[in-house]
Image (cartoon, helix red, strand yellow):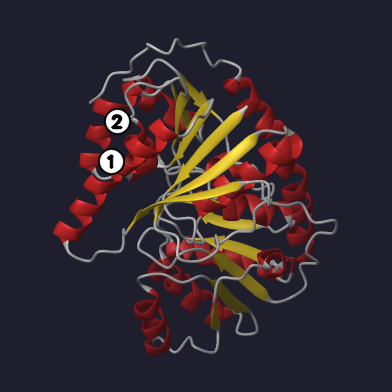
Amino acid sequence: MKVGIIVGNLALMAGGERVASNMADYFVAKLDYEVDLVSISQLDSQPAYRVNPRVGIASLGINLSGKSLLAKFLAKLKSVFAMRRYLRSHYYDVVLGTGTYPSLLMCFQGRSEAMLVGCEHLSYSACPLLWRIMRRIMYPALDWVVTLTMSDKPNYQRFHKNVRVIPNSRSFFPERPAELENPRILTVGRIDYQKGYDLLLEVAAIVCTARPNWRFRIIGDGPLADEIKRSTEERGLSDAIEFCDVSSEIQKEYLCASLYLMTSRFEGLPMVLLEAQACGLPIVSFDCPTGPSDIVTEGVDGYLIEPFDCDAMAEHVTRLIDDQDRRTRFGRAARTNSDRFAEKQVYAAWQDLFEQRPKISASAVRPIV
């Protein structure tokens, strides 16, 4: 079996790229597939995540960093033709697009013997209206659409007959969980509007006033990093909130924390929550669309807070700070519940999907939209 996995930018430390890298590693190491990771964006450095040396790395060479609307439009247009050329010059049994943009590009492929699978990374409603319209028009050119959560499945079934739910798998499962004794609250993610760091500052201001010995640690970077750091200083929270660059040793960060906090406005099935659970961290998260409610069991391994009630979130964080026994109990439950997202279970679902691949004659033609 030869599989091509299309991603936006392999050099970016983001959830979709981590999912694709994990998937490629498992496919070559456990299933003995041939796998290529294909970055739409030009790749001027090594991939952000380490991958098995048997995984092929390729790039369409598109400059997606243009700042003007015209530059962005031309890059998108160029990527359509680049993707078409690439897929017509490389043989694959299956091609996966991780995210809406890579999946839409695959719809222009036309003649193909490969199974084309669009894999969504965010919730259905998170995309702008134009992208949702394009999905509705173009996704019928794909063989399958894979979504991360059951709640999103009906949205795609309105315009595609082959929809499956396959969650992300956890990235790791350390031998020993976090001890939950360090007064540290962890958040990991790109500093942008989606992740709600402005809301996190509201929560931190309340918690740090009530429990001044506890600290917040934010791992990440992004377009709003300077603005959030400036706001942190203006609020007098500089001593309570530490900002750190993205780390390749992220597992250690989870194991040194005692609680995980997520203030996202929307998600898909957030990898950071799967990783936090695997490390035995209690989670406090806004119950945003979608993903947190698929991972966190309310009152068992964490708390789901009504979006975007910062006072309620701060109250539940403080409750866990004050109750070591509850933190320990929630942490144990998190480790146990993490098994739902074990690699073997998740990738068995992918293997089953690949076996649905029909034998297509060389003359078969897909709709070109």
Q: Is residue 339 visible?
A: yes
Q: Residue furthest front?
A: 89
As drawn, 297 above or below 247: above
Expressed as whole percent of the image width and height from the top left, the position of residue 138 reads: 28, 27
Q: Which residue is more in the foreground, 138 or 86?
A: 86
The Cα–Cα distance between marks 1 and 2, rounded to whole angstroms, is 7 Å
Seen at 44% across and 51% down, the residue is: 59
Tell me, yes or no, whether the two marked residues, 1 and 2, touch with CB atoms within 8 Å: yes
Number of the label disc, if any, that sits on residue 80: 1
Q: Secondary structure at mark 1?
A: helix
Seen at 42% across and 68% down, the residue is: 191
As drawn, 38 above or below 315: above
Name the residue beneath numbered marker 2. 108
Sooner in the amino-acid sequence: mark 1 or mark 2 = 1
Q: Quadrant of the C terminus?
A: top left
As drawn, 98 above or below 113: below
Expressed as whole percent of the image width and height from the top left, the position of residue 338 reads: 71, 44
Seen at 22% across and 46% down, the residue is: 77
Expressed as whole percent of the image width and height from the top left, the position of residue 365 reads: 33, 15
Q: Is residue 297 visible?
A: no
Residue 213 placement: quadrant: bottom right
The residue type indicated by label 2 comes to: Phe
Query: Is 182 on the left or on the right of 70, as rendered?
Result: right
Determine crowd level at label 1: few under 14, some 14-19, many 20+ residues with C-alpha closer than 10 A: some
Q: Which residue is more in the foreground, 300 or 260?
A: 260
